[in-house]
Image (cartoon, rainbow, N blue to C red):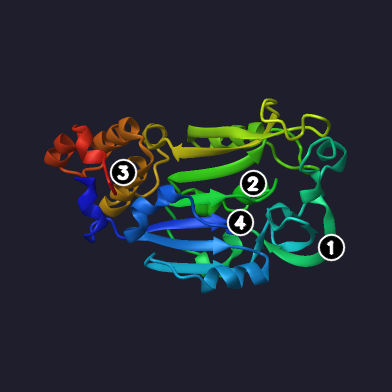
Amino acid sequence: MLEKFLTNKDAGFIKLMDIGASGKLDPKWQKLNPLLELTGFEPNIDECNRLAAQETDLPEVTYLPYALSGKTEERELKETSSIYCWSLLNPNAEWLNRFSYSDLFTVLNKSKIKTFALDDIAEIKNQDFDAVKMDTQGMELPILKGGKKILDNVFYLETETGFLDNYEGETTFSQVSEYLLQQNFIMFDINPNHRIRRKGPFAKSEQSLGQPLWCEAVWLKDLIRCHKQGKLPAINRAKAIRCLLLCASNGFYDFGYELAELFCHELKVLSVDELAILSEIDAWEIGN
């Protein structure tokens, strides 16, 4: 059933925000390509231009050359030997120098840049984002707090956070988890298998496991709890379908069905017949 919404107009477009957009989207998003409108943030101008020049099969793609933080202010950007490690925070050299990949964090240049709070960016004001993906080198919590208005309407959130302070003063997984739980997000998936070995004779040994230093996690807003608390964001039929599609594309069928019951019985944006169809597992398979 949900497959049909990839080609008709009932769902509208799924608005995905990619904060720290360097690189490529995970292949899991390909299932939703026909409906995916991407807004990416990449503070490196050259990388932003490169991304914007790429061919895409998405309906709409926009890249904005803004650095994000907790508020609109001037900050210092640390440009490291790896573009993927650039940050507004200083690398925690004392800690990182114990590991085999420490050279990636060597600061080659520092530059003054203006940073923005997410809620202050004119280009995205009043937009209803369904999903946010974040890879911001320790700045996740300030950015989330600076985007409270945006976050209120987001259903799907993907974070990449360190377990320990890989940057000085970074917000770690435990801190982000505590905050997101307060905002009624619950974790549905985690990939902690980013293991780095220490320097020494076993730095390149595949027999040595190394230590997990960061993880990617997927969080979904618990709309059931929001409804019980009287904090449910505005959800029309199109928004409801987009939430179900995000559940389906990630394999969260059980939670998706629980939401479908809310959308049918309480919000009246799905029919009883549609709910009955969604009780069959085949109805959740999309993009195969």
Residue occupying image coordinates x 30% and y 47%: 240
> What is the spatial separation of the Cα atoms under label 2 and label 4, in whole angstroms?
11 Å
Contact between labelled residues 1 and 3, with CB atoms less than 8 Å apart: no
> What is the spatial separation of the Cα atoms under label 1 and label 4, in whole angstroms?
19 Å
Residue occupying image coordinates x 52% and y 44%: 158
Residue occupying image coordinates x 21% and y 43%: 268
* Foreground of the two, 286 or 150: 286
> What is the spatial separation of the Cα atoms under label 2 and label 1, in whole angstroms?
23 Å
> Could you tell me which secondary element the residue under label 3 belongs to?
helix
Q: Which residue is mark 3?
A: 244
> What is the spatial separation of the Cα atoms under label 2 and label 3, in whole angstroms?
26 Å
Q: Nearer the viewer, mark 3 or mark 1?
A: 1
Q: Position of residue 75 (x, y in %)?
A: 78, 61
Q: Earlier in the sequence, mark 3 or mark 1?
A: 1
> Could you tell me which secondary element the residue under label 2 belongs to?
helix
Residue type at mark 1: give it.
Asn
Q: Which residue is mark 4?
A: 20
Q: Nearer the viewer, mark 3 or mark 4?
A: 4
Residue type at mark 3: give it.
Leu
Residue occupying image coordinates x 26% and y 51%: 237
Q: Position of residue 287 (x, y in %)?
A: 29, 49
Q: Earlier in the sequence, mark 2 or mark 1?
A: 1
Q: Is residue 158 above or below residue 43?
A: above
Q: Position of residue 211 (x, y in %)?
A: 70, 29
Q: Is residue 261 above or below residue 4?
A: above
Contact between labelled residues 4 and 3, with CB atoms less than 8 Å apart: no
